[in-house]
Image: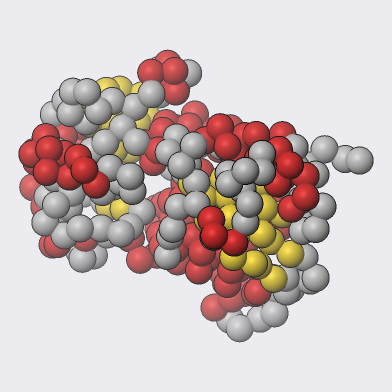
Amino acid sequence: MKTPRHFLSLLDLSSAELQAVIARASELKKLQHAGETHATLQGRVLAMIFEKSSTRTRVSFEAGMSQLGGSAMFLSPSDTQLGRGEPVEDSARVISSMVDCVMIRTFDHEMVETFAKHSRVPVINGLTDLLHPCQLLADMQTFTEHRGSIKGKTVTWVGDGNNMCHSYINAARQFDFNLRIACPAGYEPDEAIVDAAKDRVTLLRDPMEAASGSHLVVTDTWVSMGQEEEKRAREKIFGSFKVSKAMMQEADKDALFMHCLPAYRGMEVDADVLDAPDSVVWDEAENRLHAQKALLEFLLR
């Protein structure tokens, strides 16, 4: 039996394959907007395992499979035995024998890796505490559609060194751009992930300095799911890392602003930045649909 390709990290595909997926995503977007049928995955079934809830991930994968002629089933923790007595390995063997692809959104990255190791079909990381590669496909598609190739450009990440930050580090390697990361002391990204991309990544403490001349400024919520108890402390620590109009004025005159959403106006980003003309967050959100459809095609065809 042929070994399936998985998408647990941006590093699972080559740079050329990632570029091809993004190009196809823009094609699929045009077909969708034109109302043209593109049922390339007729009869295929995607299992969506959610241990961590999400609006965009569920809607984009479920709608995407429907538009491609396939179907998707939503599995919450209460719907499966996964992690409730049945080993992940056994769940992987059973579920993958009945469907064509599995998307998992969970906390522990090791769980996704274990599932993929024992799956006979492709497994997609819909988000873990370590990485969020599907969002980066959408982000790279969005930048390309608005500004052309991101190769050689400067991108600024402002805020927590979290799963999104880690995926931007991997994206810097795969899409060949320079990344500046501005985060408070003690909230740096994973050292091993940074070290693997040290020729592409610069860590800074001053977000204004990090944004200077940048072509893309990106942030994320300061309090991710599972960190609610840290909310007040984080708000105080990250206070000076809010993306403001003044920060965007430090960036390149054609700089874009992105946020994976949900966004909290007045917290990690001011409302006049999120709703400004150079904010592409709504295109970025929609592109989750198209980028994931292209990814599903790539893995299943």
User: Which residue is pictured at 77% across the width and 44% down the height?
Assistant: 93
Left or right of 52: which side holds 87? Answer: right
Q: Nearer the viewer, residue 43 or 226?
A: 226
User: Which residue is pictured at 69% across the width and 61% down the height?
Assistant: 46
Question: To which quarter of the image does residue 211 belong?
Answer: top left
**Marker count (numbered):** 0
Image location (x, y in percent) of residue 112: 59, 39
By what rule are the colours in the image chosen?
secondary structure
In the image, is residue 3 above or below residue 58? above
Quadrant of image for the N terminus: top right
Q: Nearer the viewer, residue 4 or 285?
A: 4
User: Which residue is pictured at 54% across the width and 78% down the height?
Assistant: 33
In the image, is residue 67 above or below residue 211? below
Left or right of 174: which side holds 268? Answer: left
Image location (x, y in percent) of residue 21: 63, 51
In the image, is residue 191 above or below residue 173? above
Image location (x, y in percent) of residue 213: 22, 37
Image location (x, y in percent) of residue 149: 47, 45
Question: To which quarter of the image does residue 30 belong?
Answer: bottom right
